[in-house]
């Protein structure tokens, strides 16, 4: 599964600053999406990102450019 590799890649981006994290994986034409506010390790632990199935995926971090970081701002 690709999710652990995405997690490690996102960890490398931490120095840039962010307030939310998202990961999407793909398996058998189905998307699996998990995202939440917080640091990579916090979101990883809370949402159990390593358990996401799929051999392809993408991850992202986001920094709120206006207002306060909140769930509606990154969904």
Image (cartoon, helix red, strand yellow):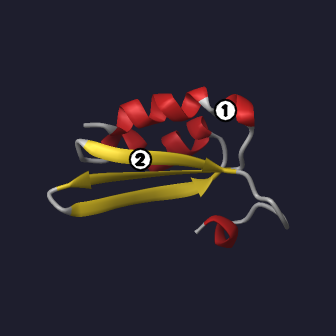
Is residue 59 depicted above or below 35 in this figure? above
Who is closer to the viewer here, 70 or 63? 63
Where disc 1 sits, the SS reads helix
The residue furthest left is: 28
Q: Position of residue 73 (x, y in %)?
A: 69, 69
Locate residue 23 relative to residue 38 in the image: left or right: left
Q: CA distance from mark 1 to mark 2?
A: 16 Å
Residue found 72% across the figure and 29% down from its top: 15
Q: Of marks 1 and 2, which one's residue comes earlier in the chain?
A: 1
Q: Position of residue 38 (x, y in %)?
A: 66, 48
**Residue at image mark 1:** 14
Residue found 58% across the figure and 69% down from its top: 75
Is residue 5 depicted above or below 61 in this figure? above
**Residue at image mark 2:** 58
Q: Position of residue 7 (x, y in %)?
A: 46, 35
Classify the position of the N terminus by image quarter: top left
The residue furthest bottom is: 72
**Picture quarter containing residue 29?**
bottom left
Residue found 73% across the figure and 35% down from its top: 16
Residue found 72% across the figure and 65% down from its top: 70
Q: Position of residue 27 (x, y in %)?
A: 20, 53
Locate residue 49 relative to residue 65 in the image: left or right: left
Q: Which mark is residue 44?
A: none
Locate residue 66 relative to residue 55 in the image: left or right: right
Disc 1 + disc 2, Cβ < 8 Å: no
Where disc 2 sits, the SS reads strand
Query: How packed is label 1: few (under 14 Cα within 10 Å), some, or many (20 or more)?
Result: few
């Amino acid at each position: 599964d690709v999710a652990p590799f995405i997690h490690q890649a996102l960890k490398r981006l931490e120095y840039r600053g962010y307030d939310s994290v998202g990961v999407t994986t793909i398996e058998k034409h189905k998307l699996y999406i998990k995202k939440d506010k917080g640091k990579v390790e916090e979101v990883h632990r809370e949402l159990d990102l390593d358990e996401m199935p799929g051999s392809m995926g993408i991850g992202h971090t986001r920094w709120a450019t206006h207002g306060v970081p909140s769930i509606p701002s990154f969904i």
